[in-house]
Amino acid sequence: MARARAFITGITGQDGAYLAQLLLEKDYDVFGLLRRSSTSEAGFYRLQWLGIGGRVQFVDGDLADYSSLARALKAIQPHEIYNLAAQSFVKSSWDQPLFTGAVTAIGVANLLEAVRLECPEARFYQASSSEMFGLVQERIQSERTPFHPRSPYAVAKVYGHWITINYRESFGLHASSGILFNHESPLRGIEFVTRKVTEGVARIKCGLARTLSLGNLDAKRDWGHAKDYVRAMWLMLQQAKPDDYVISTGRAHSVRDMCRVAFGHAGLDMDAHVVIDPALFRPAEVDILRGNSTKARAKLGWEPTIPFEDLIREMVEADLRRLGGARPRKARAA
């Protein structure tokens, strides 16, 4: 029996790397879309961190270039397609709204059209986001909660979500969307607040900095571990019928809570090191996101397994290891 083939966009990102690892463990042939640039090889460190860099087959292409997607799908004929690529940093979406729209929104339509024409029997996963809820219309958000996006990134994700539903309903594609709430890991990019905190704590612990500048400490998010969340992606594509699912822990924590866990794990007092910088506040804040994943738990049999506190401690430990070559010394100004 032929091995299952999976095609992943965004494979060098946090989710793409963990998903590739999961699929390789399940004996898939894994293909990843790679957008060539002067810095494209920098993203390979996540795959190398997981020890799978040499087991993934790469295909050149770009979500903004339909022809490259069509060629890739025609050649690979994948059984499963996971669209994880995006301009996913909310802050950057305010600086690059048109680029964010071209990749995070229209890029989804490009890929779905290529799927429709080249491999319509393949099962498709779209990475939707809890940021789509934005100015929340319900205290706890489910698949039925209306969207009110509050950033160009979130607006683009709403387009990607609805175009996926449209292709499913119009052309009968097995296309599912995961409305994933915040999920983190040691592989998270340094620009995201979780890694900014854990790397900042590690730098302070190693004597490389004295302070950590942050914005709104009272913003609350439903944070889970990326390993748990990529397992939910795979489960969605194993279902007989496509659908949309909220993936979340159901618990919300503030940035302040996260800081207390991270600094506490390193034996530091956060109040002695955290500095509030008004420039780091969002133009339109999303105060709280908390998900209701009842549907995923009932239909997929999915449950999160790694608690928030363990996640943050794991990230602090990973950042301390990354800085392990730096000998602790008298702290100096950041």
Image (tube, helix red, strand yellow):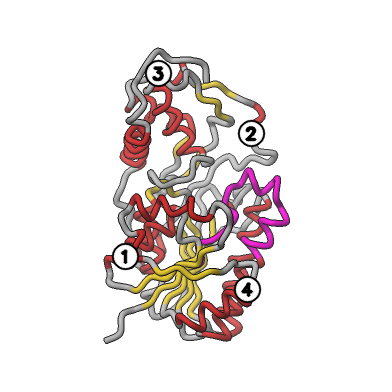
In the image, taking residue 166 as reference, residue 181 lies left or right, namely: left
The residue labelled by disc 2 is 281
The residue labelled by disc 1 is 301
Q: Are marks 2 and 4 in contact (CB under 8 Å)?
A: no
Secondary structure of the magenta portion, mostly?
A: helix
Q: Residues within 10 Å of mark 4 (few under 14, many from 20)?
A: many
- From this view, report whether residue 2 is shown above or below residue 92: below
Q: Secondary structure at mark 1?
A: loop
Disc nearer the start of the sequence (2/1): 2
The residue labelled by disc 4 is 110
Q: Which residues are magenta?
A: 83-105
- Tell which of 177 and 118 is nearer to you: 118
The residue labelled by disc 3 is 269
Q: Residues within 10 Å of mark 3 (few under 14, many from 20)?
A: some
Marks counted in the figure total 4
Q: Amino acid at mark 4?
A: Asn
Q: Quadrant of residue 35?
A: bottom right
Q: Amino acid at mark 2?
A: Phe
- From this view, report whether residue 156 is shown above or below residue 71: above
Q: Position of residue 179 (x, y in %)?
A: 50, 60
Disc nearer the start of the sequence (4/1): 4
Q: CA distance from mark 3 to mark 2?
A: 23 Å
Q: CA distance from mark 2 to mark 1?
A: 38 Å
Disc nearer the start of the sequence (3/1): 3
Q: Which residue is rendered at x = 48% and y = 45% of the image? A: 189
Disc nearer the start of the sequence (4/3): 4
Q: Amino acid at mark 3?
A: Asp
Disc nearer the start of the sequence (3/2): 3
Disc nearer the start of the sequence (2/4): 4
